[in-house]
Image (cartoon, rainbow, N blue to C red):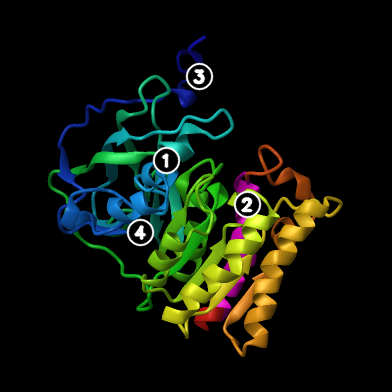
Amino acid sequence: MKIGEIDRNLAVQSKLEISGLKYRSALEEPFEIYGLYRPKETGQYRRMPAEVAERVSEGVVGLSSHTAGGRIRFRTDSTYVAVKAKLTGQCFMSHMPLTGSHGLDLYVYDGTADIFQGTFVPPFDSPEDYESVVYVRNRGMNEITIHLPLYSGISELYIGLDEHAEVGQGRRYCPVEPVLYYGSSITQGGCASRPGNHYPAAIARAYNVDFLCLGFSGGAKGEAEMADYLAGLPASVFVCDYDHNAPDAEHLEGTHAALYRRYRKSNPQTPIVFVSKPDIRPDDSGDVRRRDVVYQTYIEALRGGDERVYFLDGFHLFAGDRRYDCTVDGCHPNDAGFFRMAEAIGELVRHCLAL
């Protein structure tokens, strides 16, 4: 059954025929790219340098080319925004929509908040190479933010606007360093239905603060090489959330406090938020021990006189009614889970930034 032939609201268009449509490379001015490593200098859409990733692990090499947390900002009076994307290094998952792993989505700033306008939906049969369009509801100049795919890389990306449209530099983020996130597949965005529902993206919209997402599915293990790289990145807040990827409590115990010390040595003033995994089972001694390891790093820091550290018990990330409806598989958040994570972690980020 081809559902798009039965219900036209579910049809996906992968090639566009729009009169007056003109494409521009996303690497060109006035488009501004955030959350990626020097894309306009390198011509690549990566989250960190390949040579650094190679020193960490094979998994990080592949995943660092995924564009999780990447964003493009600009302003235009075009009545639509189209994209033409060529993707690489894709991950197909049974429990994550293509709109999250391979899609992009678009927000418009209305003077108060960034408002979701639509998703650039990849076709099921060829999600690696497609065109898609979102029509903008507001007339006149609009401040646009486009979120890039969470579980795919980009080899080429073009932004399509009406050929007669005005296009200029977009809205700037607050004049502070980016918030730095390091963690697991959850931190990377699995399994949000679209990129804008990823919890770091939601926090960024709430406070108009830039961020860098270094979440790596199964690949965030607190390695010394990664700790040194993190320590060299300018950040207004560091959110350390890799509990889930440590193979066991022993590994976490051997790396967590060490990562803190390496980071703090180079960044004595940066607030650090330690987060334990959200799917903790209180009746599982292994889960409880892992949480205790993260908590002990926090206590050690306080005892050492560090007043710029915070601990967030992962059990409280899905707090409230219907806690067990916040994931797709008992582990990875759905959009409801990411919403609750954004509220809890975002409140600490706001506090650290004194917003």
Tag 2 secondary structure: helix
* Callout 4 amino acid: Gly
Q: Earlier in the sequence, mark 2 or mark 1?
A: 1
Tag 4 secondary structure: loop
The residue located at (34%, 41%) in the rendering is 153
Work out whether residue 267 or residue 44 is closer to the camera in this orientation and state it.
Answer: 267
Q: Earlier in the sequence, mark 3 or mark 2?
A: 3
Q: Nearer the viewer, mark 2 or mark 1?
A: 2
Q: Does the rendering let one see residue 349? A: no
Q: Earlier in the sequence, mark 3 or mark 1?
A: 3
Question: Predominant secondary structure in magenta?
Answer: helix
* Callout 1 amino acid: Thr
In contact (CB < 8 Å): disc 3 and disc 4: no
The boundaries of the magenta stretch are 333-351
Choose top left, top right, bottom left or bottom right for residue 18: top left
Q: Residue furthest left?
A: 164
Label 1 belongs to which residue?
Answer: 119
The residue located at (32%, 37%) in the rendering is 133
Residue 208 place in picture, x, y as percent: 43, 69
Q: Earlier in the sequence, mark 3 or mark 4?
A: 3
Label 2 belongs to which residue?
Answer: 244
Q: Residues within 10 Å of mark 3 (few under 14, many from 20)?
A: few
* Callout 2 amino acid: His
Q: Give the CA separation, mark 3 to mark 1.
A: 18 Å
Q: Which mark is residue 285?
A: none
Q: Give the CA separation, mark 3 to mark 2.
A: 40 Å
Q: Give the CA separation, mark 4 to mark 1.
A: 19 Å
Q: Nearer the viewer, mark 3 or mark 1?
A: 1
In contact (CB < 8 Å): disc 3 and disc 2: no
